[in-house]
C-alpha cells in the first residue's frame, strides 16, 4: 500500500511512543501517507489503522478533523486561504473572489488541469500579515490580486 | 474521604471522585447529557455546569474533582444561567421535531428543555442538516437530532470493545457515524439506543409503533443465555412492544445483548402456533383443547399399553421454565418412564454420574471481572454469551490474562494473552499437555490417563505459556467451557481434564449453557437424576440416545429437533419415525411435519415461571401478556395432562405452588465434578486425509426457536447465510477459491454450500454452522468430505 520509504518513516514515528501507545503516531503516519499518495483514500486510512493496530474509524476521526488532510484527490498545489476574522477584516473575500475567478473553480474544488486545489481554512496564525494564504508549505502575506497573480506564475 | 457542601448540604465523597458522583449519591440532580455512570468522562455537553465558590466561572460537575471544603451550588443564579445558556446552544441545531420523534416522552433533551429551555429561540439562521446513516436492521438514525454527547462512541470504544461509531469532522461539521457506510455489527449494539439522550439513535423494529407513555413495564428475565439478563417487557394492549434492560449490578448491569433486546419480535410472529392441532387421516387439523388433550392421552396410553412405558421419551428445550421442567419430568416419570432430557446439543454424557448438582459457570457472574486469569475452552464467548463477554473485557482491562483453546480464532473484544487454535479433535490432547506442563510447574501428580491423552506430541509454545500463566494466576482463575466443548464427542474428557487443571491451582471450572439449563437439572429434567439431584433408581435414556434410537412416542417441549439437536438429521429421523409425537410448541416448525398432536405453548412472556441462570441465581417472573390465541402456559398444559392420566399430585392452581415444592436455597455456583475419573483415550482412528473435520458452531442468531423468528436479528451480520468456511491454505490445497460451490458429504448426507475463505479456521477443518435448515441434514460434528459441486 505504501512504499518502503514511507513505511520506514512511519515506523520511526511509532518508535517514539510506548509500545502500547502506537496509535499516538496516527497524525504523523497520515502525513507521511499523504505525502506519498497526494491524498488519503479509504484504503490508505485502513492500512494506517492496521499498521497502528487501531480501528479504521479512529483514523477517519483524525483525518476528517484536520483540514490539512485531503480526503479526495487534490491538485499539485494546495492553496489554503484563511477566512477567519483578521483576514476577513483585511479583505480575504477579495482574495477568494480573485482566485475563484482566475482559476475557474470554487472553494474546495480542483482545477481541471489538476494544478491547483482551492481550500478555505481556519486561522493559520499569521494574522499580522492578513489577508494571507498558504500554498503547499509556504505562507504568503498581505495579499492583493496582483501579488497573487505573480505568486501563481512562479508555480508550475 | 473528602467532605464538602452541595447546595448547603454536607456531603462526603471519595477523593478523586467528581462532583456529579457525590451529587447523585446525595440525591441532588444535576442535568447532564454526555455523562453516564458506566462510561468515561467526556465533559463535552456542558449541561452539568455548576457554580463553585471561588471559581471564576461555572465548572462542569462531571469533570470537577471534589476538594475538601468546596462549596458547590447547583441552583444558584450563575449555575442556572450557565445551564440555560448551554441548553440554548444545544437547541440551535436540534430540529425540535418531537411530535414525530420516537424518543418523545423518554427524551433527556426534551425533559431538560422543559426545565432549562427558552420558549422562544433567538436563533434566526438555518439549522444544520445531517444525513442519516444506515447502521443496519436494529438501529434507526436521525442524525440531525444528535447533540454530540458521544455516549454511543464511548460505548463502542470502552464497553463493547470494538469501536464502530466515531465522530468525524470538526465543529459545525462534526458527525457521528461510521464514515464508510456499514452496519453496526456488535452483539451489544442495541445499548446505544438506550444511551442516546435524544432521538438520534432509536430502535428500528420498534419505530413508530408506540409512545412510551402508552407502555407498561413488566419485569422479566431473558430466555437465551446463561446470564439470564433482567429486562422489562414493555406492553401495550396485551402485546409486547419492546424489551429494555432492567438494572441488576450482579447480572447484566444496565446492558442488554441484542439477542435479549430484539428477540421479542418473534413473540408476535406469524409462525406462532395459536390453535391445538391433531393429525386426522394424515393431515393436521385445528381443534379445541379438550379434543387435543384427549387425543394426546389416548395416543400416549396406546403406546404405553402396547410397548411399555419405556417406549416414550420427552425432550425439552433448554429455556423452558423450572416449573415446566418439574411438571414434565413428573408427568413422564408418573407414566413410568425416565426418558427425559433437555441437553439437546450435548454428545457425550459419560460423566452423568459424577456431574455436579446443576451446571454453572463455576463462579458468580460479577466475579468474572476480578479474575486474574481465564481459560476459555471451545467457545465464541462474545457471541454465545454476550454479557459474559462484556465481563471478560472488564477483567482484561483490569489486567487479567485471558487465554483460549478454540477451533476458530474468534475475534474477541479483549486480547488473548495466549491461544491454541486447533481442530476440535485435538482439544483433549491440548488440554492434557497443558495439564501435564502445569503439573510440572506446580509439582502435582495427575491421573495417568492425562498423559495418555497428551500423547507423544511435544508441548507447544502456546500450551507452555498457558500452563505458566495458570500457575501464576492460581485460584484467581476461571476455566470456562463453551458450546464447542459441550457438543464435543469427548466433552467428558474435556470436562474432567479441565477440572484436573482447575484443581491443581484452585481455580473454578464451569460451562456456559443456556437460559435455564441449571433449572432443568434441579427440576429433574435429566434421565439419571430426579428432583434436586436425587438418585434415579431407574435411569432412562439421555438426549443423545433418544436422538439415535427411535422410541415409540416422543413428547417435544419447545424443541425443533432438526435445528436444536446436536445431530439434527438423526433426531428428526428418529422422532419422525415414532408412532406418536406430541409437540408442545410456541411455533409452527418442521416438527409439525410429523407431530400427531400440537399443543400451542405460551412463550416466556406469556407465562409465570422461574429461570436459574449460570451462577445459580433463581429469578422468577410473572407473565407480561396473555398467551397468543389458544396457547396456554406450559405448567397448565402439563397439569391438565397429569390430571387426565390420573397421576397424583397434579392439583396446582398456580406456578408458585409448583415452585414451592422445590427447595432452592443455597445454590452455590460450583460446577466441580464429584470425582475425577478420566477415560482412556480412544484408539487413533484412521481418517482419510482428504476429509476435513467439521466445526459445528451454532451462530448467535440461530440458537433457539425464538431468535430464529426475530426478523431484525435474522438480517444481522452475525447471521450470515450458511456457508462452508476453510482457510486460504486449505482452499488452495483443495483447489477451491472463495465462492466455489461445493458439496459437503457427511455419512449419506450431501449439502450444497458456497465456500468462503476464512483464515480463522485451522488446517484440516471446515466450519459449517448448525441451527440452519440448510445444513441440518449433515447432522453434528464429524468428518466431512468436500467436493466441487
Image (cartoon, coloured by chain):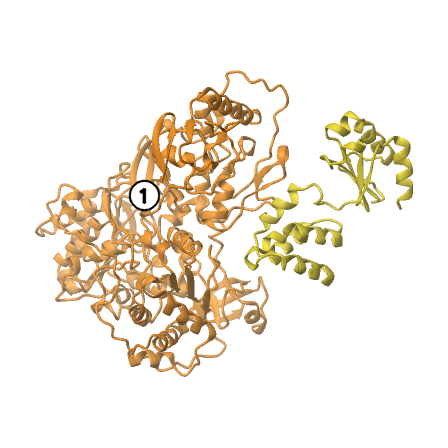
Does B404 sit above or below residue B197? below
Task: Find numbered disc 1 in the image and state the secondary structure of the residue it sits on.
Answer: loop
Residue drawn at the location 23% of the way across and 54% of the way down: B519
Camera-nearest residue between A89 and B222? A89
Q: Chain B is drawn in which colour?
A: orange
Q: Which quadrant holds the N terminus of chain B?
A: top left
Residue B366 visible in rendering: yes
Percent of width and height locating residue A45: 65, 51
Does B375 sit above or below residue B117? below
Identify the image quadrant of residue B129. Answer: top right
Does A90 sit above or below residue B310? above
Q: The yellow chain is which one?
A: A
Percent of width and height locating residue B91: 54, 25
**In the picture provided, is B444 more to the left or to the right than B523?**
right
Residue drawn at the location 88% of the way across and 31% of the way down: A145
**In the picture provided, is B332 more to the left or to the right than B393?**
left
Residue drawn at the location 40% of the way across and 63% of the way down: B777
Identify the image quadrant of residue B727. Answer: bottom right
**In the picture provided, is B587 more to the left or to the right than B321?**
right
Percent of width and height locating residue B537: 12, 66
Q: Mark 1 points at which residue?
A: B248
Camera-nearest residue between B117 and B656? B117
Which chain does tag 1 point to? B
Amino acid at each position: 500500500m505504501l512504499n518502503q520509504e514511507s513505511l520506514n518513516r512511519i515506523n520511526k514515528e511509532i518508535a517514539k511512543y510506548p509500545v502500547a501507545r502506537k496509535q499516538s503516531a496516527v497524525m504523523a503516519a497520515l502525513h507521511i501517507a499523504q505525502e506519498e499518495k497526494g491524498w488519503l483514500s479509504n484504503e490508505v486510512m485502513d492500512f494506517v489503522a492496521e499498521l497502528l493496530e487501531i480501528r479504521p474509524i479512529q483514523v477517519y476521526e483524525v483525518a476528517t478533523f484536520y483540514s490539512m488532510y485531503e480526503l479526495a484527490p487534490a491538485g499539485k498545489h494546495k492553496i489554503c486561504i484563511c477566512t477567519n476574522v483578521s483576514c476577513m477584516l483585511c479583505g480575504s473575500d477579495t482574495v477568494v473572489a480573485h482566485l475563484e475567478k482566475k482559476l475557474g473553480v470554487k472553494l474546495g474544488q480542483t482545477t481541471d488541469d489538476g494544478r491547483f486545489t482551492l481550500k478555505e481554512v481556519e486561522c493559520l496564525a499569521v494574522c499580522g500579515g492578513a489577508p494571507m494564504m498558504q500554498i503547499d508549505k509556504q505562507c504568503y502575506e498581505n495579499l492583493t490580486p496582483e501579488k497573487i497573480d505573480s505568486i501563481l506564475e512562479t508555480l508550475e | 474521604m473528602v467532605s464538602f457542601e452541595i447546595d448547603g448540604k454536607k456531603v462526603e465523597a471519595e477523593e478523586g471522585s467528581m462532583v456529579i458522583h457525590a451529587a447523585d449519591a446525595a440525591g441532588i440532580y444535576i442535568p447532564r447529557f454526555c455523562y453516564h455512570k458506566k462510561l468515561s468522562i467526556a465533559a463535552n455537553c456542558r449541561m452539568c455546569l455548576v457554580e463553585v465558590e471561588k471559581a471564576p466561572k461555572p465548572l462542569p460537575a462531571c469533570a470537577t474533582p471534589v476538594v475538601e471544603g468546596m462549596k458547590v451550588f447547583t441552583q444558584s443564579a450563575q449555575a442556572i444561567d450557565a445551564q440555560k445558556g448551554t441548553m440554548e446552544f444545544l437547541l440551535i441545531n436540534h430540529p425540535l421535531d418531537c411530535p414525530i420523534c420516537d424518543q418523545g416522552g423518554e427524551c433527556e433533551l426534551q425533559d431538560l428543555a422543559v426545565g432549562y429551555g427558552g420558549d422562544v429561540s433567538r436563533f434566526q439562521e438555518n439549522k444544520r442538516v445531517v444525513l442519516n446513516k444506515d447502521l443496519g436492521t436494529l438501529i434507526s438514525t436521525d442524525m440531525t437530532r444528535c447533540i454530540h454527547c458521544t455516549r454511543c462512541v464511548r460505548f463502542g470504544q470502552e464497553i463493547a470493545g470494538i469501536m464502530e461509531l466515531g465522530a468525524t469532522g470538526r465543529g459545525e461539521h462534526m458527525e457521528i457515524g461510521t464514515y464508510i457506510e456499514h452496519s453496526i455489527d456488535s452483539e451489544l449494539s442495541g445499548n446505544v439506543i438506550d444511551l442516546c439522550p435524544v432521538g438520534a439513535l432509536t430502535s428500528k423494529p420498534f419505530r413508530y409503533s408506540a409512545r412510551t407513555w402508552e407502555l407498561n413495564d413488566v419485569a422479566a428475565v431473558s430466555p437465551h443465555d446463561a446470564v439470564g439478563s433482567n429486562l422489562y417487557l414493555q406492553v401495550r394492549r396485551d402485546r409486547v412492544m419492546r424489551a429494555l434492560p432492567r438494572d441488576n449490578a450482579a447480572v447484566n448491569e444496565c446492558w442488554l445483548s441484542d439477542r435479549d433486546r430484539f428477540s421479542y419480535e418473534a413473540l408476535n410472529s406469524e409462525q406462532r402456533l395459536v390453535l391445538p392441532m391433531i393429525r386426522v387421516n394424515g393431515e393436521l387439523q385445528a381443534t379445541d383443547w379438550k379434543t387435543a388433550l384427549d387425543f394426546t392421552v389416548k395416543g400416549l396410553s396406546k403406546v404405553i399399553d402396547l410397548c411399555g412405558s419405556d417406549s416414550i421419551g420427552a425432550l425439552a428445550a433448554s429455556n423452558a421454565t423450572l416449573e415446566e421442567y418439574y411438571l414434565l419430568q413428573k408427568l413422564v416419570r408418573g407414566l413410568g418412564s425416565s426418558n427425559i432430557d433437555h441437553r439437546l446439543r450435548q454428545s457425550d454424557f459419560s460423566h452423568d454420574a459424577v456431574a455436579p448438582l446443576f451446571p454453572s459457570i463455576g463462579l458468580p457472574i460479577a466475579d468474572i471481572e476480578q479474575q486474574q486469569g481465564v481459560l476459555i475452552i471451545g467457545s465464541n464467548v462474545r457471541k454465545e454469551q454476550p454479557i459474559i463477554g462484556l465481563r471478560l473485557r472488564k477483567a482484561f482491562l483490569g489486567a487479567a490474562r485471558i487465554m483460549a483453546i478454540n477451533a476458530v480464532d474468534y475475534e474477541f473484544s479483549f486480547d488473548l494473552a495466549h491461544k491454541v487454535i486447533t481442530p476440535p479433535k485435538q482439544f483433549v490432547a491440548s488440554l492434557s499437555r497443558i495439564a501435564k506442563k502445569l503439573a510440572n510447574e506446580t509439582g502435582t501428580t495427575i491421573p495417568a490417563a492425562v498423559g495418555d491423552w497428551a500423547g507423544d506430541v511435544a508441548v507447544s509454545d502456546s500450551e507452555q505459556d498457558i500452563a505458566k500463566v495458570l500457575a501464576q494466576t492460581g485460584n484467581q482463575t476461571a476455566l470456562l467451557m463453551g458450546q464447542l466443548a459441550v457438543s464435543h464427542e469427548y466433552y467428558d474428557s474435556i470436562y474432567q481434564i479441565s477440572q484436573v487443571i482447575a484443581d491443581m491451582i484452585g481455580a473454578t471450572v464451569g460451562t456456559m449453557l443456556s437460559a435455564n439449563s441449571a433449572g432443568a437439572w434441579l427440576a429433574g429434567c435429566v434421565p439419571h437424576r430426579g428432583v434436586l439431584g436425587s438418585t434415579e433408581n431407574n435411569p432412562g435414556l439421555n438426549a443423545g440416545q433418544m436422538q439415535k434410537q427411535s422410541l415409540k412416542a416422543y413428547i417435544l417441549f419447545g424443541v425443533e429437533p432438526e435445528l436444536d439437536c446436536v445431530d439434527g438429521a438423526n433426531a428428526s429421523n428418529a422422532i419422525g419415525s415414532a408412532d406418536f409425537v406430541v409437540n408442545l410448541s410456541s411455533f409452527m416448525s418442521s416438527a409439525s411435519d410429523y407431530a400427531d398432536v400440537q399443543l400451542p405453548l405460551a412463550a416466556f412472556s406469556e407465562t409465570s415461571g422461574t429461570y436459574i441462570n449460570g451462577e445459580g441465581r433463581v429469578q422468577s417472573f410473572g407473565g407480561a401478556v396473555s398467551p397468543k390465541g389458544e396457547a396456554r402456559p406450559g405448567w397448565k398444559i402439563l397439569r391438565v395432562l397429569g390430571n387426565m392420566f390420573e397421576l397424583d399430585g397434579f392439583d396446582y392452581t398456580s406456578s408458585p405452588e409448583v415452585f414451592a415444592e422445590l427447595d432452592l436455597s443455597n445454590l452455590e455456583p460450583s460446577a466441580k465434578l464429584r470425582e475425577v475419573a478420566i477415560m482412556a483415550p480412544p484408539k487413533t482412528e484412521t481418517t482419510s486425509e482428504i476429509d476435513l473435520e467439521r466445526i459445528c458452531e451454532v451462530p448467535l442468531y440461530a440458537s433457539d426457536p425464538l431468535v430464529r423468528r426475530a426478523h431484525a436479528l435474522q438480517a444481522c451480520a452475525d447471521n450470515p447465510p450458511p456457508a462452508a468456511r476453510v482457510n486460504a491454505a486449505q482452499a488452495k490445497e483443495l483447489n477451491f477459491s472463495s465462492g466455489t460451490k461445493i458439496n459437503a458429504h457427511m455419512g449419506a448426507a450431501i449439502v450444497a454450500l458456497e465456500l468462503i475463505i476464512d483464515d480463522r479456521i485451522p488446517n484440516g477443518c471446515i466450519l459449517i454452522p448448525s441451527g440452519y435448515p440448510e445444513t441440518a441434514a449433515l447432522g453434528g460434528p464429524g468428518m466431512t468430505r468436500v467436493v466441487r459441486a
